[in-house]
Amino acid sequence: MITIHHLNKSRSKRVIWLLEELEMPYNIVEHQRDPMTNLSPESLKLIHPLAKAPVIVDGDVTLCESGAIMEYILNQVPSNTLRPNVDSDAYYHYLEWLHFAEGSLSLPVISSLIMSMETRDGTKPLDGYIAKELQLDLSYIENTLRVRRYFSGDCFSAADIMMTVMLEIAENLGLLENRPKIIDYLASMKQRQAYQKATRFG
């Protein structure tokens, strides 16, 4: 059985959500950030040297990085549940968005999050770059959701789990003004029963 090492206020909710969608059993070990530094605890570093979440342990396999973990879990499932067939056009849309979440979108969103935590008295050198990247990425997402219900096409997939968690962070930072398709998409994702089960963990 897969064990999830979950860190509060992290993206490890993705892994819990995926396993709930698949109705796969799992164990969860909760780790808490230091309330002063917001850093992960030593207990997580004992599991993986990066001390980041999510981390899963499955027998001899210890794995970090959300996208890799999603693929590992899906490979344990006999059918292509939550992943399009590899010979379909939807499969490559799936791959694009699965990696877009932590590739293109993560940097400007997480940079915005980090900057929101500091006291600032004016603009900084990276502000223009981050604003440009957010505009580019969020416009691309908004336009995609104008023509597709889900990121890989007509069917919900693990790519939607990857993207939703990052878009939630953007929403909490007030970055989704005038993005009605993204806002509607997030609202629909939050109605999923597996999502709601995953949010029980901080």
Image (spheres, grey):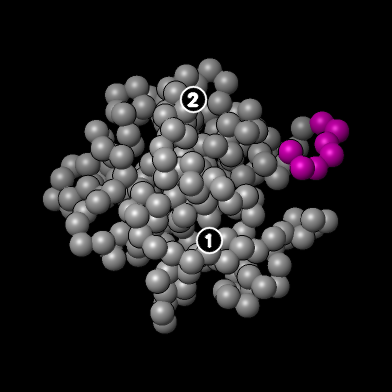
Q: Which residue is mark 1?
A: 54
Q: Which residue is mark 2?
A: 183
Q: Quadrant of residue 59?
A: bottom left
Which residue is at 48% across, 66% downward? 27
Does 4 sit left or right of 149 as displayed?
right
Label ID, residue 160: none
Does 11 sit left or right of 38 as displayed?
left
Q: Secondary structure at mark 1?
A: loop
Does 191 sit left or right of 84 as displayed?
right
Amino acid type of the residue that numbered disc 1 sits on in the rendered structure = Pro
Which residue is at 39% across, 56% downward? 19
Q: In this orientation, which residue lies closer to the viewer: 81 or 126?
A: 81
User: Residue 104: x and y, percent?
Assistant: 48, 44
User: Residue 198: x and y, percent?
Assistant: 50, 48
Q: Secondary structure at mark 2?
A: helix
Q: CA distance from mark 2 to mark 1?
A: 25 Å
Outermost residue on the bottom side: it is: 60
Magenta range is: 116-122
Is most of the magenta stretch helix, strand or loop?
Answer: loop
Q: Is residue 134 magenta?
A: no
Which residue is at 70% across, 45% downward? 114
User: Residue 36: x and y, percent?
Assistant: 83, 56
The first of marks 2 and 1 along the sequence is: 1
- Residue 53 visible within the image: no
The crowding category of the residue bearing disc 1, from other C-alpha atoms within 10 Å (few below 14, some 14 to 19, many at least 20), is many
Where's the N terminus, which quadrant? bottom left
Amino acid type of the residue that numbered disc 2 sits on in the rendered structure = Ile
The crowding category of the residue bearing disc 2, from other C-alpha atoms within 10 Å (few below 14, some 14 to 19, many at least 20), is some
Which residue is at 58% across, 35% downward? 170
User: Residue 61: x and y, percent?
Assistant: 42, 77
Q: How many marks?
A: 2
- Residue 172 visible within the image: yes
